[in-house]
Image (cartoon, grey):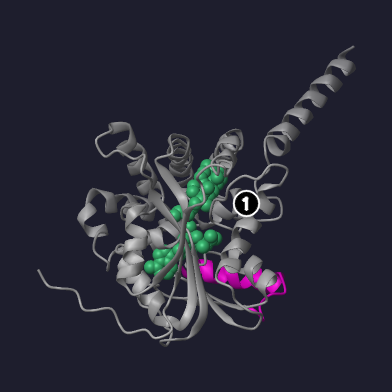
Amino acid sequence: METLTLFITGALVAVGIYWFLCVLGPAERKGKRAVDLSGGSISAEKVQDNYKQYWSFFRRPKEIETAEKVPDFVDTFYNLVTDIYEWGWGQSFHFSPSIHGKSHRDATRLHEEMAVDLIQVKPGQKILDVGCGVGGPMRAIASHSRANVVGITINEYQVNRARLHNKKAGLDALCEVVCGNFLQMPFDDNTFDGAYSIEATCHAPKLEEVYAEIYRVLKPGSMYVSYEWVTTEKFKAEDDEHVEVIQGIERGDALPGLRAYVDIAETAEKVGFEIVKEKDLAAPPAQPWWTRLKMGRLAYWRNHIVVQILSAVGVAPKGTVDVHEMLFKTADFLTRGGETGIFSPMHMILCRKPESSSPPPPEESS
Ligand SMILES: C=C(CC[C@@H](C)[C@H]1CC[C@H]2C3=CC[C@H]4[C@H](C)[C@@H](O)CC[C@]4(C)[C@H]3CC[C@]12C)C(C)C
Ligand SMILES: C[S@@+](CC[C@H](N)C(=O)[O-])C[C@H]1O[C@@H](n2cnc3c(N)ncnc32)[C@H](O)[C@@H]1O
């Protein structure tokens, strides 16, 4: 009888552990392992301090409005979150509309391929990925288009991760990664046959600066597509709940301030682009992009326990728990932003640099 009780208890414990670790939602299967979570380029003992420093930017909001401080603040953010993103989301750091009958992985890839299809590049041409992360989109786009992709990111840790993934995927001949600031890119004028940015230019303190830089490095006649993070026409600045959600998104995603959808085309035109197409890819009939985020809640709760244990035993740096908690809350704000329709992470703008481009007139000083 005792043996039977022991056997049943053992079996229940084993099923419980299996459910906790596997059924509840494995983090990305072949990606980062929980035991490898790090603070990016920040040494383990400084992760907690850097997390505090990240939050201190929001106590002095004026500082994140100045262009010089933002790249540092964004760099710190990506040191803190890159491993957790890879572990729990995969190598593409963006959203995509859900597609009935397709996996998240396929929906993500299709959203990426759409970007390169829109800019109509040919195999062998050279295109720019503005804010490339660890290169999930870059690899999908290079495989699909056979174009040569050059990615730029401010975060050195991401550069190393992206190069490693490119090599592992056998795509290092087509994909190159550069560490740099997209507000001052280390490329000559008229270098690229096309450019795209996926949920990255929202980190720029002034959209005009990054668009002007992209315009400069594009060849005349070539196209640029961007998936922008914006507040939609449903956002009302006088609604406290709307403001709470948008502030939550800004703080948990290192944004110097979300833009209104109407500002996007206006800014692109201001730097000299012609607008070819503009569309909110999150608007119906597109299926909700936030379902994946919402469905993962149980897994995030599991992840939080895993992170707490790893941090307590000294495998994960102290501070990882705080960062994870911040992301946990951010997921909620993003979901609310999606459900209320006040926020879109995929306001698409497709632009062309005119064939004969004269520089835009200088700003009038007021
Ligand atoms: C474009 C940007 C990033 C968008 C998304 C890729 C990320 C936004 C929020 C992130 C996450 C939130 C919850 C995390 C969860 C608690 C953890 O257990 C596993 C990782 C998360 C799911 C994480 C993954 C990436 C996001 C969805 C911004 C920064 C401009
Ligand atoms: C949310 S991630 C998106 C990454 C990638 N586009 C993807 O979808 O996987 C934003 C990216 O923009 C980059 N970024 C933000 N500000 C930058 C800057 N000033 N210069 C260069 N890269 C920047 C970040 O380092 C990060 O790689």
Q: Is residue 196 left or right of residue 59?
A: right
**Dividing the image into 4 quarters, which one contains the N terminus?**
top right
Q: Is residue 124 visible?
A: yes
Residue 42 visible (yes or no): no
Rendering quarter of residue 172: bottom right
Disc 1 is placed on an element classified as helix
Q: Main secondary structure of the magenta part?
A: helix
Residue 216 horizontal side relative to residue 225, left or right: left
Residue furthest top as drawn = 1
Can you say whether 100 is above or below 5 in the image?
Answer: below
Which segment is the magenta one?
Answer: 155-174
**Nearest the eye: 26 or 112:** 112
Write down the quadrant of residue 62 in the picture: bottom left
Neighbor class of circle 1 (other Cα within 10 Å; few <14, some 14-19, many 20+) is few
Residue that label 1 marks: 35
Quadrant containing the C terminus in the rendered view: bottom left
What's under tag 1, amino acid-wise?
Answer: Val
Q: Position of residue 115 (x, y in %)?
A: 56, 64
Q: Is residue 242 magenta?
A: no
Q: Residue at x 35, y 77 (%)?
A: 184
Question: On screen, 117 above or below 243?
Answer: below
